[in-house]
């Protein structure tokens, strides 16, 4: 869907070692699909140097 890269490779390695993540690029599409299935609204926005994900209840 787009370009995947780690903004913080130290945190990425830590999360991989704890098995919280397995592949880059799957998280946001998974969040979107899960939100749609739950009839929730999700917004993604890049604001300056931040990336925000807002899940409306």
Image (cartoon, rainbow, N blue to C red):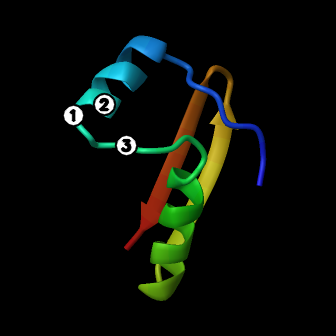
Q: Residue at x 47, y 75 (%)?
A: 35
Q: Nearer the viewer, residue 7 or 40?
A: 7
Which of the 4 image quadrants contains residue 17?
top left
Determine which residue is flagged by label 1: 18
Q: Mark 2 falls on what kind of element?
A: helix
Determine which residue is flagged by label 3: 21
Q: Residue at x 54, y 74 (%)?
A: 33
State if disc 2 and disc 1 touch (CB < 8 Å): yes
Labelled disc at residue 44: none
Labelled disc at residue 15: 2
Q: Mark 3 falls on what kind of element?
A: loop
Q: Where in the figure is residue 1, as x and y percent of width and height?
A: 77, 55
Q: Where in the figure is residue 6, as x and y percent of width and height?
A: 56, 24
Q: Nearer the viewer, residue 54 or 18?
A: 18
Q: Nearer the viewer, residue 55 or 18?
A: 18
Q: Where in the figure is residue 8, as x and y percent of width and height?
A: 48, 16
State if disc 2 and disc 3 touch (CB < 8 Å): yes
């Amino acid at each position: 869907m787009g370009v995947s890269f780690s903004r913080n490779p130290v945190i990425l390695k830590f999360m991989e070692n704890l098995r919280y993540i397995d592949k880059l690029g799957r998280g946001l599409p998974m969040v979107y699909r899960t939100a749609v299935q739950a009839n929730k609204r999700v917004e993604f926005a890049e604001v300056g140097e931040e990336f925000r994900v807002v899940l409306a209840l």
